[in-house]
Amino acid sequence: MEDFSVLIGGKAGFGIDKATLILGHLLNQCGYRIYIYHDYPSLIRGGHTFSIIRAAQTKIAAHRNKIELLMALNRETIDLHQARLNDGALVIYDSDAVKELVLSRQIRTLGLPVGKIVKDENAHEVMRNICMIGAFAKAIGIPMETLAKIITENFPKEVEMNVKVAERGFAAAETVKSIAPPAAEPLPLISGSQAIGLGLIKGGLQDYVAYPMTPTTPLLHFLAEQANDFSLKVIHPESEIGVMLMALGFAYAGERAAVGTSGGGFCLMTEGLSLSGMSEVPIVIVLGQRPGPSTGLPTYSGQTDLHFALNAGQGEFVRFIVAPGDLEEAYYWSAQALNLAWKYQIPAIVLTDKNLNEGIGNFDIRSVAEIPEIPPVTWEGKVPYKRYEVGESGISPLAFAPQKDAVIKVNSYEHDEFGITTEESTVTKKMQDKRLRKEKYLREELKGFRTVNTYGNDDRSTALLCWGSNKGVCRELAEKLGLKVVQPVVLSPFPEDAFRKAVGGVKKLIAVENNATGQLARLIKSYGFCADSMILKYDGRPFALDELETSVKEAIR
Amino acid sequence: MSQTNLGSYSPNTWCPGCGNFSILNGIKTVLNELKDTAFPLENVVIVTGIGCHAKIVDYLNVNSFYAIHGRALPVAEGIKIAKPALKVICFAGDGDAYGEGLEHLVFAAKRNIDITVIIHNNRSYSLTAFQYSPTSFVGFKGRSTPHGSIEAPLNPLELMLASRATFLARGTSHGLPLLMRLFKESIMHKGFALVDVLQVCVTYNNLYEYYAKRVYELQDHDANDPMAALTRIREWDYNSDASIALGVFYRKEATTFEEKFAPPHITTQERDVRIKQLLRESI
């Protein structure tokens, strides 16, 4: 098997998350490249949760709907997912939980008395998952030693019992398929949240402030766990309003701070966002999208907040918005968002979604471009200190209290160069011009970055236009169908020249987005570019490769 | 005492006779005194919300963050956690801290973070041209409640005591010597300190006479006793007619929030090494 997918499912509380991770690491260890899609409802116990673990020979960032292996801890998993089974697929199931299984003749089945095994071993019921994984390893020819190693590395306690239960599952199964020989050295297997967190750390993060909200909660958890190792202060205050303002307090005092949220929390942060714009106190916001309006589908994915991010906050101010498309971009741009926010003293938004934040895949740091430190402009002692000194670039030198010879005043009101409130008309205009002038220099600096990615030869006249996490699925599909991909990564300030160059020679531009109105298509239209057709999906689920293939073929027919 | 001119060039736009002048003059004197005995002026950071009170930042030539309505507290907390050596003083209004940003006040007290909060409590919204506030009397005829407000005021000190504040005091804008003593003690207190200043708004809510008849300074009060503090705090509920105690109601020594964080202790090189190490562990 060179490119195959495993689906494991059951109720929340069955340990599907952990099992998913073990399966991912197990196949990673065997030299496959991995991508994991995790689908779960907004509840703590019950419901139906599942993961699709896809293994391939080359690096991937998308899942397929069709699967080759189904691991069912209950009947519901089979009922819900049997339509996904490819011919020749194998169903591994708990025969104590699933009686009388009737499937089409092309499907092979492997039933194990998982419930009984776990009971025999006096193991916790949740270990049914590891018993199934033992059977899985045997079924596709992975040695028990490899599995034992993965279990040992991933369970903080009860390692022996887990290995024992896995061995029982392994012994009860038979080998029916065989894995491919290792294609490459294993790479780290991490989530988007981890890539973003490490990127922020790389960018010099000192403080992370957040209120839990899917899909950025795992980022809060990750950074809280890493706080000590990376000397971070990670704080979970009373509300997203408190989050944003506290973070601005950190930045005023000279520390690099970031916040994380989703659309609803970002609503509460917008007054602070505008304050950042006016006071020129830098901040990075990780905005993980999920379907709205309002609470919407809390644990699912969407790309519905592009225009919200572009326009949030009263008044006119410069903002940097970047939508990374995969783990490497998430790492790179999270670091650069901090660098650019601090150099230009502006708010920067890392616009992601549940699909990117909670998707798990291989991370190859070797393919990440060098991240040079971009030093902020700091005060060199000239007196009197003017926090908002007007200069050519609009960037005023930063100073942080305590300073013997500088009084550092920042202000939400319109203010003069010293930061004292003003309502005077000429000063108002002068200061607004100063702040907006920064955009010109930011645009100039961004010319040295890959603000718009393209994939596929320039002679390909049909292109998929995508942003954010759709990069993975579009790129893989375009390669298969001989199409080009255009992926703007920086969305504000919009890289007009780079985009024009990227769509040069494209006759048919197909926008692929996870929203109902085509938000990127609308954005490019304001710069005079037109998407010829749109493939929109807004049911909360990301595009699967096979599903998008059908839609794209229809669009180009 | 060496006198530093703490003033700025900003023209003062408070109404003549405004109670805010006492607060401004009081804090100038106290900061001048403390700079010789306790901490240098450059260590002071003032944070305000929005309202008449907040103009004080423009009139003081010290470090400041002129924040937004109701949000002085979280900004102040961020500054203090980042640099515990700084003396962070919030000035906030009653509409500001007891209304729009009440959640932040409660949580800052709960954390016992070492900041000082001085409330310009004029018991009305004045900069927005006269509406009732969270501490206005029942029946307050402001422009949003022309027939009289129908809700009772909250007692902010009682709320703050319940929220675990460790220093609670009340003064008035017409009792400068006491006010300065309260400012000084609240700034020197290690932990969350709040001074509720009954500040007279001469234009919209002139309670000068009202307060003059009722205020008295706390005597023989054990501020370390929370039950005694509660009794004294409940004496006047900001609504019914009663004597109004001034002074320190409550003080307690307790661990502060910001001291639980270790100071930054990692170099860029160490950070990069740990990132690589963490990635290796993810294989």
Image (tube, rainbow, N blue to C red):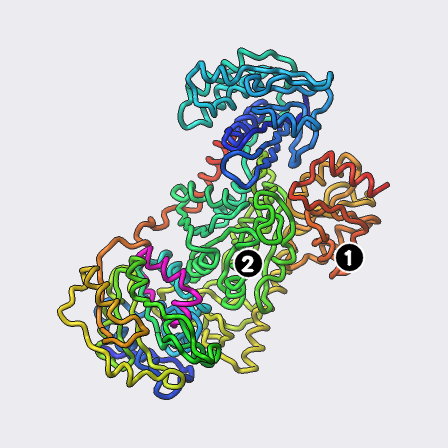
Q: Is residue B103 magenta?
A: yes
- Between residues B149 and A76, which one lies in front from this camera angle? B149
Identify residue type, mark 2: Cys
Image quadrant for the N terminus of chain A? top right
Q: Is the Cβ of the residue at disc 1 closer than 8 Å to that at disc 2?
A: no
Determine whether the residue tagged by mark 1 lies in a helix, strand or loop: loop
Residue B205 image offset from top left, x and y in percent: 37, 82
Residue at 61%, 52% in the rendered image: A322
Residue depth check, mark 1 versus mark 2: number of the one nearer the observer: 2
Residue A159 image offset from top left, x and y in percent: 42, 22
The magenta segment = B86-113
**Above-or-below relation of A112 to A48:** above
Q: Residue furthest bottom?
A: B16
Tell me which corner region of the image, top left, top right, bottom left or bottom right, holds residue A75: top right
Which residue is labeled 1 in the image? A529
Q: Residue furthest right?
A: A557
Which residue is labeled 2 in the image? A267
C-alpha distance separating marks 1 and 2:
30 Å
Specify the subunit that label 2 lies on.
A
Specify the subunit that label 1 lies on.
A
**Above-or-below relation of A499 to A396:** above
Considering only order in the chain, which callout, 2 or 1, is on the residue closer to the N terminus?
2
Residue at 51%, 48% in the rendered image: A213
Identify residue type, mark 1: Phe
